[in-house]
């Protein structure tokens, strides 16, 4: 998959996070999948999106949506 396709898909995910916060957990899982695909293809991971994934993890743990990792 070309980097441009990833950019389009990631932009759509960011729109979903912004416009549908009630589906944020689902969007986070999609973000995690896209980052894993990029990593598997040897593409560089955008720092801001890696930071967003970390932020969402911390937020869901803080809000009790997901348990804290052991």
Image: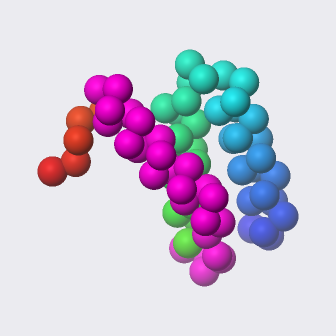
Please tell me which residue lies in front, 32 or 63: 63
At a point 70% along the width and 30% down the height, the residue shown is: 18
* Residue 54 is covered by the magenta coloring: yes
Q: Residue furthest bottom?
A: 42
Residue 53 lies left or right of residue 57; in this view the side is: right
Q: Residue furthest top?
A: 22
**Quadrant location, the N terminus:** bottom right
- Which quadrant would residue 41 be assigned to in this image? bottom right
Q: How is the image coloured?
A: rainbow
Q: Residue at x 74, y 59 (%)?
A: 6
**In this image, 37 relative to 3: left or right?**
left
**Residue 25's spot in the image, x, y percent?**
49, 32
Q: Relative to 5, is 25 above or below?
A: above
Would you say the magenta stretch is mainly helix, strand or loop? helix
Q: What residue is drawn where x is 41% and y is 36%?
A: 59
Q: Position of residue 27 (x, y in %)?
A: 58, 36
Q: How many marks?
A: 0
Q: Nearer the viewer, residue 38 or 44?
A: 44
Residue 30 in sight here:
yes
Where residue 50 sits: x, y (%)? 55, 59
Residue drawn where x is 80% and y is 70% of the image: 2
Q: Is 50 one of the magenta-colored residues?
A: yes
- Residue 55 to residue 34: above or below: above
**Residue 28 placement (x, y as % from top left):** 53, 41
What range of the chain is rendered magenta? 40-65
Left or right of 7 on screen, residue 59: left
- Does residue 65 appear in this view? no
């Amino acid at each position: 998959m070309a980097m441009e396709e990833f950019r389009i898909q990631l932009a759509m995910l960011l729109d979903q996070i912004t416009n549908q916060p009630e589906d944020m957990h689902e969007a986070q899982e999609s973000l995690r999948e896209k980052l894993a695909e990029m990593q598997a293809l040897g593409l560089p991971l955008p720092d801001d999106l890696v930071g967003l994934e970390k932020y969402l993890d911390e937020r869901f743990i803080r809000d009790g949506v997901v348990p804290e990792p052991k």
